[in-house]
Structure formats: structure tokens, C-alpha cells
Amino acid sequence: CGLVLGSNLCFRGGWGTSYPSNLLVYIGNISEDEWIIKTKTLKTRSPMPWWVLNMMTEEDLRVIYTYIKSLGVVIE
């Protein structure tokens, strides 16, 4: 795995190699309502357990969004 946004974390399997998204960057570019829609319809490659996000309540997803936003901005 190579260096991606300061992390060399990756997952390899029969699907190929996947790299985790930087949620600070991702959420910084979408609204809370967009986050809800995306997490309810998300389907990603392993090892992300996307089905868990799909089943979360809207209230829980809003709390997660608020928490991630509270972490501040990303300086690239």
C-alpha cells in the first residue's frame, strides 16, 4: 500500500486494494442532509461495513456528522 493523505492504511483482497476516505475532507464538502442521503444509500468495497451505516437512524447519522464537523478543518 502506498502513502495516501499521510496514511499508509489500506486493505487488500479479491476486490483489489481499497483506501479509507478521510471523513474530515469528505464531510467538509457536503451538507448534513447530503450526508444522510449518502449514508443511507452507500455501498462500498470491503472492509467498510456500509450496511451498518445504511441501517443507522437519521438521528444517529446527524450526531456522527456533527461530531466529525466539530473536529475542525483539514490542512492539506
Image: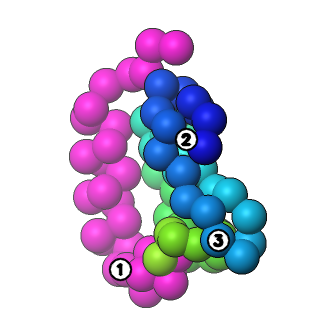
Position of residue 62 in the picture relative to residue 41 (left or right): left
| Residue visible at 64% across and 71% down in the picture | 13
Main SS, magenta residues: helix
SS label for mark 1:
loop
**Residue 23: image location, x then y, percent:** 46, 44
Observer-nearest residue: 33 or 28? Answer: 28
Mark 1 to mark 2 CA distance (whole Å): 20 Å
Residue stretch rendered in magenta on the structure: 50-76
Which residue does the numbered mark 3 point to in the structure image?
Answer: 13
| Residue visible at 50% across and 84% down in the picture | 51
SS label for mark 2:
helix
Q: Say which quadrant the N terminus sits in.
A: top right
Q: Amino acid at mark 2?
A: Tyr
Q: Amino acid at mark 1?
A: Thr
User: Number of callouts in the render?
Assistant: 3
Mark 3 to mark 1 CA distance (whole Å): 30 Å
Observer-nearest residue: 70 or 14? Answer: 14
Mark drawn on residue 57: 1
Q: Are the residues tagged 3 and 1 within 8 Å (C-beta)?
A: no
Q: Is residue 12 visible?
A: yes
Observer-nearest residue: 8 or 38? Answer: 8
